[in-house]
């Protein structure tokens, strides 16, 4: 039984050079899925962040106002 090694350093250098020459090239026959990796529009992300921050701000304001109005309310 013959054991097969990975190859000599010259073979490895040739394979590495061939791989580096091929990096970044696109297979023209393979089409990209239109739903694959669509970025979220920046304006949509900003709208959601503003809504979340506004909701948290209003909730905090509601907690503060209810604390002070409860302190002034007459107790029975």
Image (tube, rainbow, N blue to C red):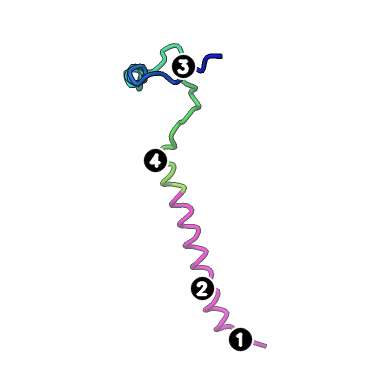
Q: Secondary structure at mark 4?
A: helix
Disc 1 from disc 4: Cα separation: 50 Å
Local secondary structure at mark 3: loop
- Circles 1 and 4, Cβ within 8 Å, touching? The answer is no
Q: Nearer the viewer, mark 1 or mark 4?
A: 4
Q: Which mark is residue 42?
A: 4
Instruction: For marks 3 and 4, give the one nearer the viewer.
Output: 3
Q: Position of residue 30 (x, y in %)?
A: 46, 15
Marks 2, 3: nearer the viewer: 3
Foreground: disc 4 or disc 2: 4
Q: Earlier in the sequence, mark 2 or mark 1?
A: 2
Residue 6 horizontal/vertical position (percent) = 44, 21
> How far from the left and from the top, in percent, is residue 76?
67, 88
CB atoms of marks 4 and 2 within 8 Å: no
The numbered mark at residue 31 is: 3
Which residues, given as a range, are shown in magenta? Answer: 49-76
- Say whether residue 68 is magenta: yes
Residue beneath the point at 57% across and 79% down = 70
Task: Identify the secondary structure beneath mark 2.
Answer: helix
């Amino acid at each position: 039984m013959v054991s097969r090694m990975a190859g000599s350093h010259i073979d490895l250098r040739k394979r590495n050079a061939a791989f580096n020459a091929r990096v970044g090239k696109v297979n023209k026959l393979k089409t990209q899925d239109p739903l694959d990796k669509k970025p979220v529009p920046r304006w949509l992300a900003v709208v959601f962040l503003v809504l979340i921050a506004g909701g948290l701000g209003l909730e905090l304001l509601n907690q503060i106002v209810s604390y002070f109005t409860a302190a002034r309310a007459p107790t029975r």
